[in-house]
Image (cartoon, rainbow, N blue to C red):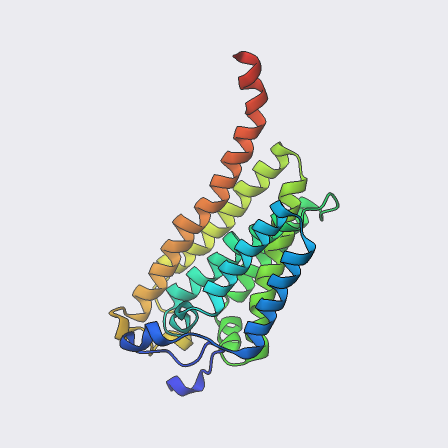
Amino acid sequence: MEQDVWTPYCGAAPKPSDLWTSWNLDPVLLAVLAAATLAIILRLRARERAFGIAAMGVLAISFVSPLCALSSALFSARTVHHVLLVGAAAPLLACATPTRRAGPLALMLALQTAVLWGWHAPAAYGAALSDDLTYWLMQLSLLGASVLFWRSVAAASAPASIGVLLAAMIAMGLLGAVLTFADLPLYAPHLLTTTAFGLTPLEDQQTAGLLMWAPASAIYLIAALLRLNRLLAPAKVMAA
């Protein structure tokens, strides 16, 4: 497969020597991020505003910084990109826009899991790196489904939210395990782009799987432990 078949939104895979100058200065993207940040500053209260601005910072790292270009070369970098979306930007946006009318918890878990696993199917992933519209459909669906998930977690009771967070941890870990133990590289867009960074395509994929298996899954575990701590806090106070 020729490398020039793939024309990802973030551009062609950079050489390591060019990485730190490979910023994405797409004027449409910058305008959208600036408009969203301005809306957050003008319309949200101080606490929610802080969460919203932090989320915009995470999105800027994901789409503007050299991480965007690196994700054209390495599937493991794309994994970091997706983890930032679903595990950092999404919960921050959920905290910036809290609601008591969140969707059913189990349904939001199923939606987030289906979107995450679906876009990591090799054919769907290849399509996203071949067409800008499909690329943005991938990114926005991942972010949107995860925002809905985190909002439902925040609105649910502590026992229910802990259970669904542990289920999300398992879903992320299973996907990581599939990628880690696959015998062959699954993602055609990265077959010719990893060697410049000292990795074979399979090693790159295994690194991505380990990132999902450990750090990404840990986000849900930490959130579950925080909810558990808040659940037990009144009992601790009474015992004291």
Q: Residue at x 61, y 45 (%)?
A: 47
Q: Is residue 148 above or below residue 29?
A: above
Residue at screen point 67% across, 50% down? 107
Image position, residue 239 (x, y; %)? 54, 12
Q: Position of residue 60 (x, y in %)?
A: 49, 65
Nearer to us in this view, 186 or 152: 152
Q: Residue at x 41, y 73 (%)?
A: 69
Q: Is residue 21 left or right of residue 6?
A: left
Where residue 187 appears, x then y in whole percent? 42, 72
Give x and y (percent) for residue 80: 42, 60
| Rendered residue at 38%/76% (across/down) | 22
Q: Is residue 219 above or below residue 147?
A: above
Q: Is residue 40 left or right of residue 20?
A: right
Q: Residue furthest right?
A: 101
Q: Is residue 72 visible?
A: yes
Q: Is residue 218 above or below residue 18?
A: above
Q: Nearer the viewer, residue 167 or 11?
A: 11
User: The N terminus appears in which quarter of the rendering?
Assistant: bottom left
Q: Is residue 196 above or below residue 234?
A: below
